[in-house]
Image (cartoon, helix red, strand yellow):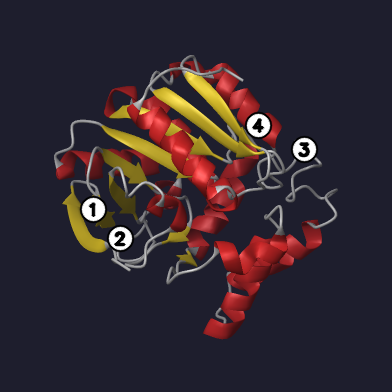
Amino acid sequence: MIRWEMKLISTERGSFEVFCKGQGPALCVTHLYSEFNETGDRFADTFTETNQVFLVNLREAGRSEQAHEPYQLSMIETVLDLEAVRLELGIQSWNVAGHSTGGMLGLVYGMRHPQSIDSLIIAGSAARVYASSSPYCIYHQGHPQFEKMQMLIERLKTNLSEEERSRCSRERTKLSLHEPDRYDEYFTGDVHKSMSASRMNFFAREILLFDITKQLHKVTARTLVICGAHDVQCPLPFSREIAELIPNAELEVFNDSNHYPFLEEAKKFSRVIKEFLFHPVMRHKT
């Protein structure tokens, strides 16, 4: 397995750890609180066949710059950091792809710097607070798996042994699979990433006021919105909303997926991504 190449990018906003892999048009991937390393990321890996992918560790993740003030962990500040990375890399504009909270960040990026983005790919995400809005969301107190999910998240923030961390991460992920028994089939290979507790804690507060639905019209990039029909983290209605409010967006629903369509329906995901990136014909709005 070809590992990702690590680069430390020095910008006017600090240094950021970036992992690179693949050839083709530039594409940026990140996540609000994941901490990446040379083993990469399964979502990002789906683009390396067709794109030069830049997988970015945000502030307080890996060897990237620390947050010198709490507000520097916010989404808008994070977008400014990504812009600084793009400029330092000498990339005129790039594609941006985000899964889950990475998709939320992608939407903010698309609103704030539309001229920097050729296309947006938003998978399993939302444009507003989701936990308190839908009882179908696993982060809603009315969801039957709410307590189990919260317990696993809190444990993952602590100093666990490698074996216990792996077990908790596995159980947490299985809650978001349409067919949990296929976990070992989906999560093969040597990919190991962790969670930035400080970023996760900041996001848990920021999301309480998060609602950018009235600004999505500012996103001018071609946008592909992807969602599993059974997504328990960011249920399908949130993706439908995003696709309806972005002028140049289309929605692709994966009927046999929960929160990980790029693994649960990998062949279809690859086909849809290639069609969107290299055969830009609007197929359907909803």
Residue located 64% across and 73% down the image: 168
The amino acid type of the residue labelled 2 equals Ser
Question: Above or below — where is 86 with respect to 244?
Answer: below
**Which residue is the site of mark 3?**
134
- Of marks 3 and 4, which one's residue comes earlier in the chain? 3
Q: Tag 4's secondary structure? A: helix
Q: CA distance from mark 4 to mark 1?
A: 34 Å
Mark toward the viewer: 1 or 2? 2
Which quadrant does the N terminus fall into?
bottom left
**Which residue is the site of mark 4?**
238
Q: Which mark is residue 14?
A: 1
The amino acid type of the residue labelled 1 equals Gly
Q: Can you see residue 92? A: yes
- Tell me whether the residue at label 3 lies in contact with that at label 4, contact meaning CB atoms closer than 8 angstroms: yes
Residue located 46% across and 38% down the image: 271
The amino acid type of the residue labelled 3 equals Ser
Q: CA distance from mark 2 to mark 4?
A: 31 Å
Question: Above or below — where is 130 with respect to 163?
Answer: above
The amino acid type of the residue labelled 4 equals Phe
Count the labels in the image: 4
